[in-house]
Amino acid sequence: MKSFEELLEESVERHGHLCAGQVIGVRMAMLGCRLVGIEEPKSPQFRKKLIVYVEIDRCATDAIESVTGCRMGRRTLKFKDFGINAATFVNLDTRAACRIVSTEESRDLAKKYAPDQSNKYQQQIAGYKKMPDDLLFDIQRVRVKLPEWEMPGPPRRHAVCSRCGQMVRDGRETEAGNETLCRPCAGEAYFYPADNISPES
């Protein structure tokens, strides 16, 4: 795997700016890969052997994606909307998995590792670069259930919504009584109908 500085530079270029989340995400991804035995996640040897579950839609997730090469479109990056700055790394060959959480204490500890920085945000960036893994992160060995339809590759399961006729892939349908429903028809929509929509709306 490339050095931390090289990976951070690549991630910043992809993300658009340097921030504390980039430092945390790059370090989290490097540590997660090492702990589950993935030496170079973007190499052909390992490209389809790593799945990462991210738990927040913020800066660190872009860094994790950059370092690992995992993508939602490849079904190797999974998003669990927990609002926690955490990620779980799974080696598909060995099923070794670890969940890494960014500690809240690291915010206060940053000043100890970057005392020359007076600006809080610069202090976090500099401090997170130097802070030991065991202070920056909580690390837990875990097991992850991986149903067949969660795996990378073509869809292994299809269902048709009984109400709207929409095709639902990868086991995301819901059963309600005798009906097979897509999530919107089951009442889980994030949108609602609006009248008189125009391109300018």
Image (spheres, helix red, strand yellow):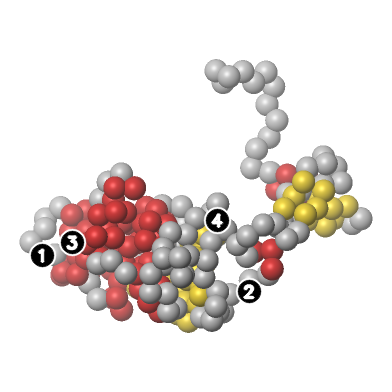
Q: Which residue is mark 4?
A: 74
120 vs 159, nearest the viewer: 159
Q: Are marks 4 and 2 in contact (CB under 8 Å)?
A: no
- Mark 4 nearby-residue class (10 Å; few <14, some 14–19, many ≥20): some
Q: Which residue is mark 1?
A: 115
What residue is shown at x 88% (from left), y 52% (from top)?
Answer: 179
Q: Give the tally of numbered discs.
A: 4
What is the secondary structure assignment of the residue under circle 3? helix
6 vs 159, nearest the viewer: 6
What residue is shown at x 34% (from left), y 47% (from top)?
Answer: 15
Marks 2 and 1, how far apart at CA = 43 Å
Can residue 3 be seen in this snapshot? yes
Q: Which residue is mark 3?
A: 126
What is the secondary structure assignment of the residue under circle 2? loop
Q: Which one is in front in this view, the residue at disc 3 or the one at disc 1?
A: 3
For the C terminus, give its image quadrant: top right
49 vs 130, nearest the viewer: 49
- Kindly identify the amino acid type of the residue bearing the numbered disc 1: Pro
Q: Which residue is mark 2?
A: 145
